[in-house]
Structure formats: structure tokens, C-alpha cells
Image (spheres, helix red, strand yellow):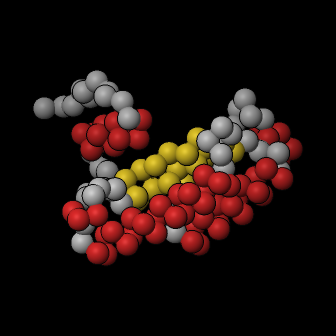
Amino acid sequence: VVARVGAQLADADQTTFTVVSIAELLSVYETERLVQQLVELDMDVRNIVVNQLMPFCKDEEKIPLLRTRAQMQQKYITQLLELYPETEYTISRIPLLGEEVRGIRRIHRFAEVCTGLPLPEPDTPR
């Protein structure tokens, strides 16, 4: 059973790993370590999600803390892009949201943010 599961995990047609990270030093380091380990195990990893990103807007519109945080995150996004070129990896950038993603409508809105596409309105019970 273990050998069969290992073979399935190493089969890119059956299994792909998506690494979820945030744009901070330790998380980028752990992402790098995890991707290296998965590659050493011949496991397919080509998707990286960077979560909780501060919205990028004009500097004069931000309070200093938010501006500093967005600049720090940009530094780590740049580092991730250098480590994992978008020709080989899909890097998804997910903004920091003001509320939890709970309930059909919020999940729908989150899916639109993630894909960048307008999606049909979900059927919800009334």
C-alpha cells in the first residue's frame, strides 16, 4: 500500500502539490525548503499561492505601517519570483481580506479574486 501511494504521489498526472506561503522571511525560507524536498522526491510542485498580501496603492494613500508592510512583501514576492520563475511555476497572489472567507457569497467573491475572472452568481438558498 505504501509503495502504491508513493507512486501515486510521484505521478504528476495524478498529483500536484500547491504550496501556500505568505510574503515574509521565514515563510519564503520554508517554501524554498519544501519545494526542494518535493522535487528531491520527484513530486510535482508548480503552484505557489502567496496569501495575505497588502493591497498596493499610491504611497500617499497609505499610513506608514501599511506602506512599509507592502514594500516588505514586495521584496519577498520578488525573491519568490527569482526562485520560482513564472515560466515554470504559477505564482498566485492573494490579497489580505478584511473578513473571513465563510459562506457561499464570500467564497464566490474569493474565487473571483483568485482567478481574476467574473464568475456566475452561485445559487443560494433563500
> 52 left or right of 61?
right
Tell me where residue 87 appears, x and y as whole percent. 66, 37
Q: Residue furthest bottom?
A: 65
> 67 left or right of 63?
right
Image: 77 above or below 125? below
Q: Residue furthest left?
A: 126
Image: 60 above or below 110? below
Toward the viewer: 124 or 36? 36
> 17 left or right of 96?
right
In the picture, which quadrant includes the C terminus? top left
Residue 44 placement: quadrant: top right
At x 31%, y 75%, the residue is 65
In the picture, which quadrant includes the N terminus? top right
Tell me where residue 2 appears, x and y as whole percent. 83, 47
Tell me where residue 58 appears, x and y as whole percent. 27, 58
Tell me where residue 66 appears, x and y as whole percent. 31, 69
Residue 52 placement: quadrant: bottom left
Residue 117 in view, yes or no: yes
Toward the viewer: 77 or 102? 77
Toward the viewer: 6 or 27? 27
Toward the viewer: 81 or 58? 58
At x 29%, y 56%, the residue is 57
Residue 99 placement: quadrant: bottom left
